[in-house]
C-alpha cells in the first residue's frame, strides 16, 4: 500500500487530482497509509473532509465505498441483508418441485441471496477500496461499537456463510469524518489517527478555486478567496467553507465578473452565505467585502 | 525515530497537561516519527496523540516546551496544587435526629416547610438538607421517536422476521411480525447563570442539574456569567458536594457579572448548532438581568427556540407576586420561552420537573 515515499509524494498525487492538501493533512494521510490505520477527520462543515476520501480513492485507483451514517443505522444497513423476497420465491419453487431439492436448501443462504452493504463490500475489496465512513457522529453509540469491531479485524462472520475477508488478506484504507455533534467513543478515537482540517488561507483558497473553477481566472479566484476570508472574520453563524467559495466563484464567472464587486456580491450572496440571519448581517456590510 | 524515553516522556508531559495519552498512542507516535523526517515530528505527534480539536492548543503548548525549550522543568505537583486552591464547598451532613417518632413527625412537617422555602432564605444547614432532597428529584425527559426499530405488537411489517418464520411453515407467511420505531428520551441541556445576582440560587440549581445528569449521561450542563463554561465533565461524580466543589473550581467567573446574550451566542455557535441543542429540552436558569444589549438576548433565544424542542426558563425572581419581567434581557427572551417558572424552592423545582416531563407534544407558536 505504501506507494508513497514521504508526505510530499501524497500531496503531489492529490494535487494531480485537483485536491490541495496542506502539509499536516498530507502527513496524516501518509501515516494512515503506511501504518495501516484509519484516519479520523474533523473540521468545520465545508472544509472538504469528504472530498479528501474521494481524491484519495482516485489517487490510489481504488473504489470509493461510502457509508453514510445517520441516526438509527444498524448492522443490516451497514453490513448485509438477506434478499427476503428472492428467498421466499426460491423456497416456493422448491416446494412445488420445480427445483431439485438435495442441496438446494443451503443455497437459500448463499451468495446470490446476500445483499452486500458498504462495510461488507469494503472488507471484501480490501486494499482495492477506500472506505469513507461519513459523519460517524450521527450514528448511535451502539453502532460505533459495532464499527470498531469491524475496523479492528477487517473480517466479518456471517453465520450462514462463514467468515468474509478480502482475497489477499489486505484491509481497505479507512477515512472517517465527524462534525462533532457528539463526543466519539475513546476506543474508536484510540484506533484512529486524527487530523483537524482548518479553513485554508487566502493564497491556498485562491489556488483551490482556480483549480476547481478554471473559468474563474487568477483575478476572480484571488478576489473570491479574499472576500471569503473576510466573511469568515465576520462572526457568522455559518461561516462559508471551500465548497461555498467554489460555487460563488463559478456563479460570478458565469455572470461575467472578473472580481468581487458590491453589485456582483449582492446578486450572488446566497451562494456564499446560507443562513438567514447571516445574510442580513452581511448585506449591511457588503462594501467591506470588496476593496 | 525518536528514542523510547523521549516518546514516553513527551506522553507523560501531555498527560500532565490533561490529555488522555494511552501507551498505545505513544507507540503509534514513535512509529510515526520513524516514518517521517525529523522536521515533521510535530505532525507525527498531532496525528497520533491528539483526537479532539480543543486538544490541539494544549498539544502545541506542551510540544513547544518539550522539544524546543528542553524538558519541562516545573515540578509536577505545581499544576495540581494550583487547581486545588479554589474554595472547596464542604458538605454539611444532614444529621440524623436521635430522638423518637415525635421528632420524626416534626421533621416531616419541617421538611414540608422547607420544600416551600425560598433558597435565598435558607440557612446553610437547611440548604444542605434541601440538597439531599433535591438529589431524589427525578427529572424525566420527554421522548422522541428514533429511526431505530424494534419488535412491536403493531406497526409496520418486519420483513426479515416474517420471512424467517415463514420457512417454519413451508414458506407460507402465516404469522406476520411487526416492528415500530423505538422511543428515546430527549436530551436535557442546562444553562446556569452563576453571576453574583443569582448567588442565592445557583448552588441549589446546580445540585438540581447534577441530579439530572447523574440519571442520564447524555444530559449536559453549562454555566455562564461573563463567559460560558461546560460543566458536564466536572459533574461526573456521584457526590453532590464533590460536584459543587469541582464546578466552582471549573468556573472562572463564579459570582461575577452577567453577559447573557454573548454567553447564549457562544453556546449556540460552539455546541448548540453542532447538534447538542437540536431537539433537546433547554433549561435556562437566570434572572435575566443583562448588562449588555438585550436585543442580542432576544436574537439568540430566537435561534435557541428554533433548535430546541422546548425552552424552559427558570427565574427565581418570578416567585414574588409583584414580579413582572421588566428586566430588559428577560423581556427580550420571554417570547421564545415555552415554560416560565420560578424554581426558587424545592416545590417549584418539582413543578418544573413535571412541566419538562409533560412537554411531549410539539408546541404551537405563531
Image: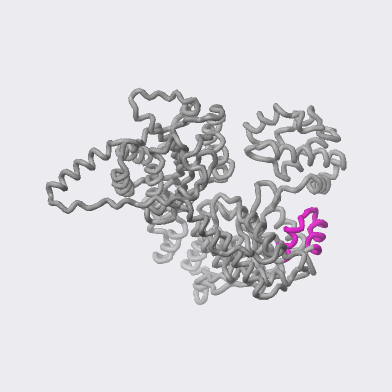
Residue at 83 percent of width and 41 percent of height:
A222
Judge whether A211 appears above or below A109 on screen: above
Q: Is residue A17 magenta?
A: yes
Q: Tell me residue A254's x, y (percent).
A: 82, 36
Q: Tell me residue B360's x, y (percent).
A: 39, 39
Q: Quadrant of the N terminus of chain B?
A: bottom right
Q: In the rendered image, which quarter is residue A155 located in?
A: bottom right
Q: Nearer the viewer, residue A180 or B70?
A: B70
Can residue B202 be seen here? The reply is yes
Can residue A132 be seen here? The reply is no
How many numbered dots are placed on residues in this image? 0
- Decide whether the magenta segment is chiefly helix, strand or loop: helix
Q: Nearer the viewer, residue A279 or B85?
A: B85
Q: Nearer the viewer, residue A107 or A187?
A: A187
Judge whether B132 appears above or below A82 on screen: above
Q: Would residue B264 appear left or right of B182 to someone viewing this image?
A: right
Q: Is residue B146 magenta?
A: no
Question: Which color scheme did the rendering employ for the protein?
Answer: one colour
Q: Nearer the viewer, residue B190 or A283?
A: B190
Q: Tell me residue A163's x, y (percent).
A: 56, 74
Judge whether A120 appears above or below B279 on screen: below
Residue at 78 percent of width and 69 percent of height:
A3
Judge whether B143 appears above or below A134 on screen: above
> Which segment did they paint magenta?
A8-30
Q: Tell me residue A127's x, y (percent).
A: 69, 69
Amino acid at each position: 500500500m505504501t506507494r508513497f515515499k514521504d508526505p510530499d509524494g501524497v500531496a503531489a498525487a492529490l494535487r494531480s487530482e485537483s485536491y490541495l492538501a496542506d502539509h499536516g493533512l498530507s502527513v496524516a494521510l501518509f501515516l494512515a497509509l503506511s501504518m495501516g490505520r484509519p484516519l479520523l477527520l474533523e473540521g468545520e462543515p465545508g472544509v472538504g473532509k469528504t472530498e479528501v476520501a474521494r481524491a484519495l480513492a482516485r489517487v490510489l485507483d481504488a473504489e470509493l465505498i461510502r457509508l453514510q451514517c445517520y441516526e438509527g443505522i444498524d448492522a443490516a444497513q451497514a453490513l448485509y441483508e438477506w434478499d427476503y423476497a428472492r428467498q421466499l420465491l426460491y423456497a416456493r419453487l422448491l416446494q412445488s418441485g420445480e427445483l431439485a431439492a438435495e442441496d438446494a436448501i443451503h443455497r437459500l443462504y448463499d451468495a446470490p441471496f446476500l445483499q452486500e452493504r458498504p462495510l461488507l463490500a469494503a472488507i471484501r475489496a480490501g486494499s482495492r477500496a477506500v472506505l469513507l465512513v461519513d459523519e460517524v457522529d450521527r450514528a448511535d453509540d451502539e453502532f460505533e461499537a459495532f464499527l470498531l469491531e469491524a475496523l479492528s479485524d477487517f473480517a466479518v462472520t456471517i453465520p450462514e456463510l462463514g467468515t468474509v475477508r478480502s482475497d489477499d488478506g489486505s484491509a481497505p484504507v479507512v477515512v472517517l469524518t465527524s462534525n462533532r455533534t457528539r463526543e466519539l467513543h475513546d476506543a474508536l478515537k484510540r484506533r484512529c489517527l486524527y487530523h483537524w482540517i482548518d479553513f485554508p488561507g487566502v493564497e491556498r483558497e485562491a489556488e483551490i478555486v482556480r483549480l476547481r473553477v478554471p473559468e474563474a481566472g487568477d483575478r476572480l479566484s484571488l478576489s473570491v478567496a479574499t472576500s471569503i476570508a473576510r466573511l469568515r472574520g465576520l462572526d457568522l453563524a455559518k461561516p462559508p467553507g471551500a465548497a461555498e467559495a467554489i460555487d460563488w466563484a463559478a456563479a460570478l464567472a458565469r455572470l461575467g465578473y472578473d472580481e468581487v464587486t458590491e453589485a456582483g456580491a449582492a446578486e450572488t450572496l446566497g451562494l456564499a452565505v446560507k443562513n438567514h440571519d447571516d445574510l442580513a448581517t452581511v448585506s449591511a456590510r457588503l462594501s467591506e467585502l470588496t476593496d | 525515530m525518536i528514542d523510547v524515553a523521549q516518546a514516553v516522556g513527551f506522553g507523560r508531559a501531555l498527560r500532565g497537561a490533561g490529555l488522555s495519552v494511552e501507551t498505545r498512542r505513544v507507540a503509534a507516535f514513535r512509529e510515526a516519527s520513524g516514518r517521517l523526517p525529523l522536521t515533521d515530528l510535530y505532525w507525527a505527534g498531532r496525528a497520533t496523540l491528539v483526537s479532539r480539536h480543543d486538544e490541539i492548543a494544549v498539544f502545541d503548548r506542551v510540544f513547544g516546551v518539550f522539544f524546543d525549550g528542553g524538558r519541562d522543568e516545573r515540578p509536577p505537583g505545581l499544576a495540581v496544587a494550583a487547581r486545588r486552591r479554589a474554595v472547596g464547598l464542604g458538605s454539611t451532613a444532614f444529621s440524623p435526629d436521635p430522638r423518637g417518632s415525635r421528632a420524626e413527625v416534626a421533621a416531616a412537617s419541617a421538611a414540608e416547610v422547607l420544600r416551600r422555602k425560598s433558597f435565598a432564605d435558607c440557612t446553610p444547614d437547611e440548604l444542605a438538607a434541601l440538597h439531599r432532597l433535591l438529589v431524589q428529584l427525578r427529572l424525566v425527559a420527554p421522548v422522541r421517536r428514533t429511526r431505530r426499530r424494534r419488535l412491536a405488537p403493531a406497526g409496520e411489517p418486519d420483513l426479515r422476521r416474517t420471512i424467517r418464520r415463514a420457512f417454519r411453515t413451508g414458506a407460507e407467511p402465516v404469522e406476520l411480525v411487526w416492528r415500530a420505531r423505538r422511543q428515546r428520551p430527549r436530551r436535557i441541556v442546562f444553562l446556569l447563570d452563576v453571576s453574583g445576582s443569582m448567588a442565592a440560587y445557583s448552588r441549589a440549581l446546580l445540585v438540581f442539574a447534577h441530579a439530572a445528569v447523574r440519571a442520564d449521561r447524555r444530559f449536559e450542563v453549562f454555566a455562564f456569567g461573563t463567559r460560558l463554561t461546560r460543566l458536564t465533565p466536572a459533574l461526573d461524580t456521584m457526590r453532590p458536594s464533590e460536584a459543587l466543589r469541582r464546578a466552582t473550581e471549573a468556573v472562572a467567573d463564579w459570582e461575577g457579572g452577567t453577559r447573557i446574550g454573548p454567553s447564549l451566542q457562544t453556546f449556540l455557535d460552539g455546541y448548540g448548532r453542532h447538534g447538542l441543542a437540536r431537539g433537546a429540552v433547554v433549561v435556562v436558569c437566570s434572572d435575566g438581568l443583562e448588562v449588555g444589549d438585550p436585543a442580542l438576548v432576544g436574537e439568540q433565544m430566537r435561534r435557541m427556540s428554533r433548535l430546541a424542542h422546548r425552552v424552559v426558563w427558570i427565574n427565581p425572581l418570578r416567585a414574588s407576586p409583584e414580579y413582572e419581567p421588566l428586566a430588559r434581557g428577560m423581556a427580550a427572551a420571554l417570547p421564545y420561552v415555552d415554560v416560565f417558572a420560578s424554581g426558587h424552592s424545592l416545590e417549584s423545582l418539582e413543578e418544573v420537573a413535571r412541566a419538562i416531563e409533560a412537554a411531549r407534544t410539539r408546541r404551537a407558536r405563531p
